[in-house]
């Protein structure tokens, strides 16, 4: 964590307003849950370079702190989340951008169509390059405006823009990559832009190994099969791993006792281990995350996926 904060401090200290700018567009396609990327370079004019430098510099300057990324953390206003490049497939994108044979340049409007990522690369002498990435929801498409006549004043002449293709770049950045680390501004777009399912599957396998080591389940490997690559179940497992109630023997003993008293329906084997099936995995995951809560006002019982612990000691 200290190294992450140190790198973030360096990122903020560098003057990116003086950087040279390169621009790339990418098309991300997913086949059988495997993402592939196609990269093109794009020539951009001086004014756009200046705007991109400004967008990147302002976003970095406006970020207060960096926290370690995990699968359950929400966006944190002006704080950002950090994760190594190696835990994502952004390294594959970097290999394409920095290949010995550099990416081809876009030559026509059609080359830009259906691209769903654009990347600004900022270079400062003797420093690692900074990559600023924006995810394009739905991809770039031709925008034709028919209700108005669209004009620009160019070379002392009004030019008709009707039927011209318009590609929109906004003032947002979804995540940065610098010196082997990704700094995430918008978590949702980051996870859409990169193939992140593999990281969550690795997390699934780790917690299943913990379940087996602790001998909590009669059939721990069945959990991997039930969860598979379903994002909802992968996130639920990640929440269980983060909360860590399953590591507390008193919690697990009390769970069994209360389950029996209140007829919750969680199944146990003859030797006292949890049994999980497709029919009851929702229930088991909720209880393991301590998500079944009572209202002290009217004694109603609720299952919750998001909760905040309150300090009642004061």
Image (tube, rainbow, N blue to C red):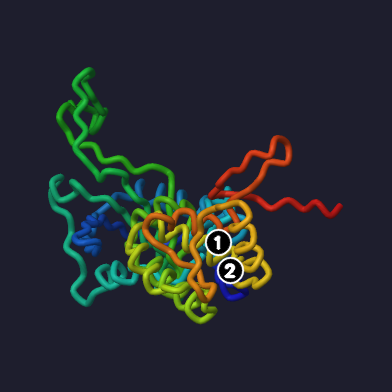
Name which residue lies at 65% across and 50% down. 308
Q: Is residue 206 visible?
A: yes
Q: Which comes before the other along the chain, label 1 or label 2?
A: 2
Residue that carries the numbered disc 1 in the rendered image: 288
Question: In the figure, is residue 195 to the left or right of 100?
Answer: right
Could you say where residue 126 lies in the image, as x and y percent from the top left?
Answer: 45, 76
Q: Nearer the viewer, residue 64 or 86?
A: 86
Q: Is residue 270 above or below residue 189?
A: below
Q: Quadrant of the N terminus?
A: bottom right
Element type at mark 2:
helix
Q: Residue furthest top?
A: 147
Name which residue lies at 31% across and 53% down. 118
Residue that carries the numbered disc 2 in the rendered image: 246
Question: In the figure, is residue 286 to the left or right of 119?
Answer: right
Q: Residue furthest front?
A: 270
Q: Is residue 93 above or below residue 294?
A: below
Element type at mark 1:
helix
Distance between the Cα atoms at labels 1 and 2? 6 Å
Could you say where residue 233 lies in the image, as x and y percent from the top left?
Answer: 41, 58
Could you say where residue 153 lies in the image, as x and y percent from the top left?
Answer: 26, 28
Callout 1–callout 2 Cβ contact below 8 Å: yes
Name which residue lies at 59% across and 57% down. 259
């Amino acid at each position: 964590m200290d190294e992450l904060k140190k790198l973030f401090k360096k990122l903020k200290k560098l003057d990116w307003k003086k950087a040279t700018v390169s621009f790339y567009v990418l098309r991300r396609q997913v086949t059988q849950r495997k993402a592939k990327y196609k990269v093109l370079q794009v020539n951009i004019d001086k004014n756009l370079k200046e705007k991109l430098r400004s967008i990147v510099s302002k976003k970095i300057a406006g970020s207060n702190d960096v926290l370690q990324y995990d699968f359950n953390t929400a966006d944190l206003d002006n704080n950002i989340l950090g994760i190594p490049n190696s835990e994502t497939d952004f390294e594959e994108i970097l290999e394409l951008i920095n290949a010995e044979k550099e990416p081809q340049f876009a030559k026509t409007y059609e080359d830009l169509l259906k691209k769903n990522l654009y990347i600004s690369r900022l270079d400062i002498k003797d420093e690692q390059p900074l990559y600023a990435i924006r995810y394009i929801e739905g991809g770039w498409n031709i925008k034709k405006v028919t209700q108005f006549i669209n004009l620009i004043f160019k070379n002392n002449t009004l030019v008709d823009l009707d039927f011209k293709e318009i590609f929109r770049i906004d003032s947002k950045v979804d995540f940065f990559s610098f010196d082997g680390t990704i700094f995430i501004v918008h978590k949702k777009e980051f996870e859409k832009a990169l193939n992140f399912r593999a990281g969550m599957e690795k997390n699934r396998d780790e917690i299943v190994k913990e379940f087996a080591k602790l001998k909590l389940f009669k059939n721990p490997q069945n959990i991997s099969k039930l969860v598979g690559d379903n994002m909802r179940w992968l996130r639920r497992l990640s929440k269980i791993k983060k909360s860590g109630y399953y590591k507390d023997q008193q919690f697990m003993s009390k769970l069994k006792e209360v389950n029996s008293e209140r007829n919750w329906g969680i199944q146990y084997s003859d030797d006292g281990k949890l049994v999980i099936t497709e029919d009851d995995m929702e229930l088991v995951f909720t209880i393991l995350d301590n998500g079944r809560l009572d209202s002290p006002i009217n004694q109603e019982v609720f299952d919750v996926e998001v909760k905040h612990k309150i300090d009642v000691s004061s």
